[in-house]
Image (cartoon, helix red, strand yellow):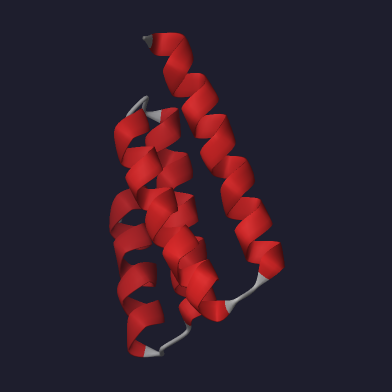
Amino acid sequence: MDFFSTQRYAEVNAKVRKDFIAEAAAWGSLGDANRLRGNYQLVITNLEKSLAIANKLNTSELRVSVFNSLANAHRTYAKTL
């Protein structure tokens, strides 16, 4: 099982268990994997999904983490333009 299959399994499992923090973390991890592959637009999409969950949960720690990742993704993407 490759990383993306494992990631998708974790994402589905998190939704089934209604573990929204795990779902947000799964989107963040998928964003990190896409960053390593250089797919910055998909990174941003993944992290925005994570941020939406963090906002629903009203967890400042998770939001700070996602905002940091988003800033890094935008900065790295801008360097490729």
Q: Is residue 68 visible?
A: yes
Against 71, is 58 above or below? Answer: below
Quadrant in the picture for residue 18: bottom left
Residue ID at (61%, 60%) = 63
Left or right of 33? Residue 67 is right
Viewer-nearest residue: 75 or 36? 75
Report if residue 2 is visible in the image: no
At 57% from the left and 52% from the top, the residue drawn is 66
Instruction: Give the quadrant of the C terminus.
Output: top left
The residue under the point 39% across, 70% down is: 10
Residue 15 lies left or right of residue 52; in this view the side is left
Give percent across and percent down for residue 74: 48, 29
Residue occupying image coordinates x 67% and y 55%: 64
From this view, report whether residue 64 is shown above or below residue 71. below
Q: Residue 56's x, y, as percent?
A: 49, 77
Q: In this image, 80 relative to 75: left or right?
A: left
**Height in image: 48 above or below 44?**
below
- Can you give x and y, in whole percent of width and height, for residue 58 in the image? 60, 76
Task: Locate residue 73, reporting x and y percent.
Answer: 49, 32
